[in-house]
Amino acid sequence: QVQLVESGGGLVQAGGSLRLSCVASGRTFSNYAMGWFRQAPGKEREFVAAISRSGDSTYYADSVKGRFTISRDNAKNTVYLQMNSLKPEDTADYYCAADYTVIPRTKPAAYMYWGQGTQVTVSS
């Protein structure tokens, strides 16, 4: 089992920044690719970003490319999502997830473990 706890969400004005954190416990963190997903009210959960076990490879949804940065610190069992130039359409609950795989995947169904989510609201 892997337990994931997100933090860092909140209310921010359009154009602002937030940094989300996700702390993992329970298993060897560096064995898992990590992903961030989001879900807005009435919409399906969608892929935001993913990072490989070592952190050497990162992947982004087109909608956040150039604005968001995913990173990880395996010594701290933590994955981050730096979100810059936020837009109202980024408003959603953000979830981190762990996937026991070498190459990160973009589909939510591929991820074994999920956090409880942190809410991000971007006002216009």
Image (tube, rainbow, N blue to C red):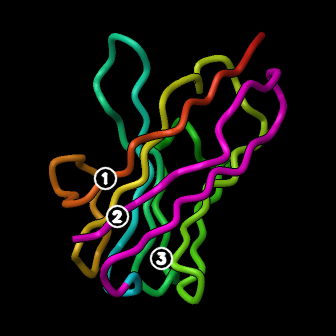
Among the two numbered marks 2 and 1 on one chain, the one whose residue lies closer to the N terminus: 2
Label 2 packing within 10 angstroms: few (<14), some (14-19), many (20+): some
Question: Which picture quadrant has residue 41?
Answer: top left
Q: CA distance from mark 2 to mark 3?
A: 23 Å
Indicate the amino acid at tag 1: Trp
Q: Which residue is mark 3?
A: 57
Q: Which residue is mark 2?
A: 3
Magenta stretch, residue numbers? 1-28
40 shown above or below 107: above
- Identify the secondary structure beneath mark 1: strand
Among the two numbered marks 2 and 3 on one chain, the one whose residue lies closer to the N terminus: 2
Name the residue: 31% across, 52% down. Answer: 114
Q: CA distance from mark 2 to mark 1?
A: 8 Å
Counting from the top left corner in percent of width and height, residue 87 is at 70, 24
Q: Does 120 appear in magenta? A: no
Indicate the amino acid at tag 2: Gln
**Which dot, 2 or 3, sits closer to the camera?**
2
Q: Does 14 appear in magenta? A: yes
Q: Which residue is mark 1?
A: 114
Label 1 packing within 10 angstroms: few (<14), some (14-19), many (20+): many
Q: CA distance from mark 1 to mark 3?
A: 21 Å
Counting from the top left corner in percent of width and height, residue 96 is at 42, 53
Name the residue: 61% across, 29% down. Answer: 120
The one nearer the camera, 103 or 7, is 7
